[in-house]
Amino acid sequence: MSHLRQSPRRHGAAEISQRHTGYLQAHHARGLVPAADLTLAANQSRESVVAVIAERYPRDGGFDGIFASTDPMAMNAIGALAALGKKVPDDVRVIGYDDIITASNFQPPLSSVRTPMIDAGKALVDSLLAQLSGAPPRQRQLASSLVVRESSGTGPPAAR
């Protein structure tokens, strides 16, 4: 499985870096070591994702899955794979991150890691209020969950 990672120069680099760390930890927890060259750096633009996938997919003989740092990157990856004549999830399975509102309506519907946005917003406000009171910034890690849909090949069979 390849990890389509957002280039770290953009806003939210720490968050993207943490997602990549999670990708590596998940592999290590199962006794796997992902090849470093399977991490593909791109920005979220369609052009960037298409270029990275078009360059890597034929050279490597393909990969069977993509875990993208964001849902828009995953959606652009699906488009790039389609341009190469590959079907999702039959040829390559794709999972995004954030479970944005359009993920469930995308074709195929996108499997995604859902982040608790309301809880994240509350934690951010609490942290800002605490800092305004003189307290040091506090980091909180919020639980996320995987929303399984057709793009990962394990969605509802009736829809496939």
Image: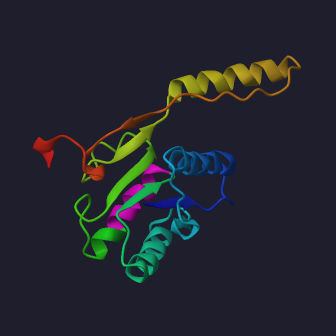
The secondary structure that dominates the magenta segment is helix
Q: Position of residue 123 (x, y in %)?
A: 64, 23
**Residue 57 highlighted magenta (yes or no):** no
Tell me which segment is drawn in magenta. 70-79
Q: Is residue 124 above or below residue 114?
A: above
Apparent side of residue 28 relative to residue 138 in the rendered image (left or right)? left
Residue ID at (27%, 47%): 109
Residue ID at (14%, 45%): 159
Report which quarter residue 42 is drawn in.
bottom right
Apparent side of residue 158 relative to residue 77 in the rendered image (left or right)? left
Q: Position of residue 117 (x, y in %)?
A: 51, 30
Total marks in image: 0
Q: Is residue 67 above or below residue 38?
A: above
**Residue occupying the far front of the picture:** 31
Q: Nearer the viewer, residue 159 or 134?
A: 159
Q: Position of residue 147 (x, y in %)?
A: 35, 37
Residue ID at (63%, 45%): 18
Q: Position of residue 160 (x, y in %)?
A: 14, 49
Apparent side of residue 22 relative to residue 59 in the rendered image (left or right)? right
Report which quarter residue 73 is drawn in.
bottom left
Report which quarter residue 15 is drawn in.
top right
**Residue 73 highlighted magenta (yes or no):** yes
Q: Nearer the viewer, residue 79 or 33?
A: 33
Q: Is residue 138 above or below residue 95?
A: above
